[in-house]
Image: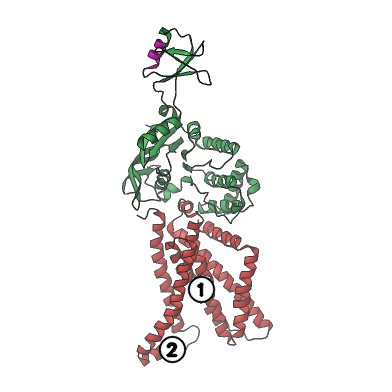
Chain colours: A green, B red
Amino acid sequence: MTQAAVAIEGLHVRYGRIMALDGLDMRVPAGGVTGLLGRNGAGKTTTIRAILGLVRPREGEIRVLDSPPSRTTRARTSVLFAEHGLVPEMTLMENLVCWGMINSLGLAEARSRAEAVLHTLGTLHSAAAPVRELSSGNRRLAGIARAFMLPRDLVLLDEPTASLDPVRAEEIRAGIRELAGHSAVLLSTHNLVEAEELCDRVVIIHNGRRLAGGTPEELSEPGDVHLVRTESGTALFRGQRHRPDGKGFVRLDSGVSAADTLAELLREGNRVVEFRPERKSLSQTFLELAEEES
Amino acid sequence: MTAGLTLREMYHTVRSMGKAGLVRFLLVYVGLLGIVIPLQVNIPEVSIMIFGLLPLYIAGPAGVDAFAGERDRSTLETLLASPISPGRLLAGKLSFCAGFALLASWIAMGAFSLVSALSGRPLPGPAPYLAALALGVLTAVLSGLAGMSVSLNARSARSSQQWYSLVLVAVAVGLPLLVSRVIPHIPPGVRTAVVSAFDAGWVSAGSLGVAAVLILAIAALGMRLAVRMRRLWVLNGG
């Protein structure tokens, strides 16, 4: 089994009367990107807080980088919450320099790291601007600069590309992929397309419990629905003629395996040009699971 | 870590005030409290003690913002996610509150001394100056801790300020009332002994006693705050 950066077993966390995590089990492997998916209130932010040791669990166990969450594990972890975490009145550079110093860097090193990360993100021109004067996208980018500024073994990102334009979002995704080469990344997101594209593994949670987990491919396992393209365009199946969709494929919910469906199609005289099982998107899987639970 | 936090507090305060705010601050603290009022008091030894009490008005309000302001700005959670310890967080915040108050007080004291010398007024001797400096350090730390203590439990910066104002009023009104009630019950011999404890001048048993009381209060408040600081890291209230 892959060594885990985070191992959570049967974690229960309560805020007053509200049970935020209700026996959560999950693992974040030591490398790559793990996606944490769930609806609003599913427990994603609480999971991140628990990893940082910012909530007191009622039950269960959590280990971060082989230790219980503590100041030592926080020194090896970087986080971007939904809020950027920067002081709005201070300039971006002042924020980053102070953040570096709070994380044990000297003034000169903090300044040089800040300049380097702003240069990498292409936001050096905003360094002297107060954070409150930046656009919402640039404020998000400023938060990302803070989270990426220090090399860490574990990086926790809550909706990192929210409010970024598509070009910036793609740049940040590339940055996350690069980061995942030497750190474990836990990415909490609502953007299922992003999760599918970026994550090596995905954990879906609902009401503080794990619903499903695995690679995006495992979670989008084909079912009994198949796509067929024929020479005539339409397909005769079980005595009925089916019309194609806009892409020229006829969608058949056969209820049997791909091999049996293809055999039936050929028996009924269809001249098959292309045939494949329909793969569910992560988004479909997520919606189905969420609907089942609701 | 502590230096980074102190620097952050300084930047935040200076940027929040802006240039116009800084000028107003200097006009009020240096101009009015540092020059005009002390020059109205014709006893230089009394005037100089104003600078020992001036930090009360600066360190406390700065401390009031320490944690409640972080909550309002949504920066507290990120700060707590750093490897900073409760002790260092407390030290970093307190260094700024006390340091800022002392700096303002010392600038005002310098202005007062300069104006006194230029206008030919008598200046107090070195002992009153040293006493004012020592008192300034103690009041800066004590009021900074008091402000931070209120801030730790407040839900927002506004409620923190309201609570701190209530505490100030309670102390300003309650303490003299308490003293006036207690004094008649103190035996005359003890009263005479207490008064005569200050007879030796600035370095007397009386003044050392006052310093000891302030130091004890600082130690008690500081220890209580250090213990309660750990609660900050428990966002679900235990």
Q: Amino acid at mark 1?
A: Leu
Badge 1: chain ID: B
Q: Earlier in the sequence, mark 1 or mark 2?
A: 1
Going by the image, does B150 lie left or right of B10? left
Q: Which residue is mark 2?
A: B195
Is any part of residue B66 visible from this angle?
A: no
Of residues A1 and B65, the one drawn nearer to the viewer in this rendering:
B65
Can you say which quadrant of the picture contains the C terminus of chain A?
A: top left
Locate residue B177, reporting x and y percent: 41, 83
Q: Are marks 1 and 2 in contact (CB under 8 Å)?
A: no
Q: Amino acid at mark 2?
A: Val
Badge 2: chain ID: B
Assess whether residue B115 is covered by the magenta stretch. no
> What residue occupies the far bottom of the structure in this picture?
B188
The magenta-colored residue range is A257-264
Both marks 1 and 2 on one chain = yes
Residue under the image location 44 percent in, 30 percent down: A284
Eye-nearest disc, 1 or 2: 1
Look at the numbered disc 2 and give the secondary structure of its residue: helix
- Against B129, residue B222 (above or below) is above
Locate residue B198, reporting x and y percent: 46, 86
Of residues B107 and A288, the one drawn nearer to the viewer in this rendering:
A288
Q: Which residue is mark 1?
A: B56
> What residue occupies the far front of the structure in this picture?
A240
Dominant secondary structure, magenta: helix
Residue under the image location 48 percent in, 57 percent down: B71
Residue under the image location 44 percent in, 12 percent down: A236
Locate residue A158, reporting x and y percent: 48, 43
Can you say which quadrant of the picture contains the N terminus of chain A?
A: top left
Residue B190 is drawn in which quadrant? Answer: bottom left
Going by the image, does A83 lie left or right of B29? left
Locate residue A193, reporting x and y percent: 50, 33
